[in-house]
Image (cartoon, helix red, strand yellow):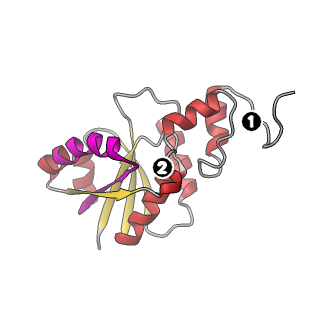
Amino acid sequence: MSVAVCPGSFDPLTLGHQDVILRARSMFDEVVVAVARNSSKSALLPVGTRVDLARAAFADVDGVRVEAVDGLLADFVRACGASAVVKGLRGGADFDAEVPMAVMNRHLSGVETVFVVGASELAHVASSLVKDVARFGGPIEDLVPPGVAAAVREALGVPVAPTAGGGAR
């Protein structure tokens, strides 16, 4: 059985993440979504909330499981018996950031990283931008799986976004 690990902070999980994970599932028998703490970022959502939201997003998808990971990804990958790490790319900047991590993970674990180019219609969707839009009251429901928008707004302490067409008065 082929196993891949798809790591990320998923703070929050977006439709771009979901797209990459579902396409990874079409290539591997099992995909482990590894919800990680990113020491270079300050998380909006606690790890437990991120895990719960990801589990809800993939509840109906056979062969996808979600786990929290703390520590080196290379150790987690070995423990899962994974043959690959899968990372999504939106463009060149993502590639430039991901290559050194892929090389280090291969060095530490012997496991290769497979890059999946994200869907072009989701290339503008990034967790940081989703949080910024939500922080200022903008709609994010079309950027994230069900339930994620409410969790983001609650964590930010902002009200539900106005419906489309509402505009300022």
**Residue 117, can we see it?**
yes
Residue at the image point whose x is 75% and y is 35% from the top: 160
Query: Is 101 included in the stretch rendered in magenta?
Result: yes
Q: Quadrant of the C terminus?
A: top right
**Alpha carbon of mark 2 to alpha carbon of mark 1: how far?**
23 Å
For disc 1, the neighbor class at 10 Å (few under 14, some 14 to 19, many from 20) is some
Q: Which residues are magenta?
A: 81-103
Q: Amino acid at mark 2?
A: Ala
Query: Is 106 included in the stretch rendered in magenta?
Result: no
Q: Which residue is mark 2?
A: 123
Secondary structure of the residue carrying numbered label 1:
loop
Residue 166 versus residue 26: which sits nearer the camera?
Answer: 166
- Closer mark to the observer between disc 2 and disc 1: 2
- In the figure, 13 relative to 43: above or below? below
Residue at the image point whose x is 41% and y is 71% from the top: 26
Q: Position of residue 157 (x, y in %)?
A: 67, 25
**Residue 81, can we see it?**
no
Which label is found at residue 22? Answer: none
Q: Quadrant of the N terminus?
A: bottom left
Q: Which residue is mark 1?
A: 161
Q: Is residue 36 left or right of residue 119?
A: left
Q: Position of residue 18 (x, y in %)?
A: 50, 56
Q: Is residue 51 left or right of residue 56?
A: left
Q: Position of residue 81 (x, y in %)?
A: 24, 61
Q: Amino acid at mark 1?
A: Ala
Residue at the image point whose x is 57% and y is 30% from the top: 132
Quadrant hosting residue 39 = top left
Residue 52 versus residue 14: which sits nearer the camera?
Answer: 14
Q: Position of residue 149 (x, y in %)?
A: 64, 42
Secondary structure of the residue carrying numbered label 2:
loop
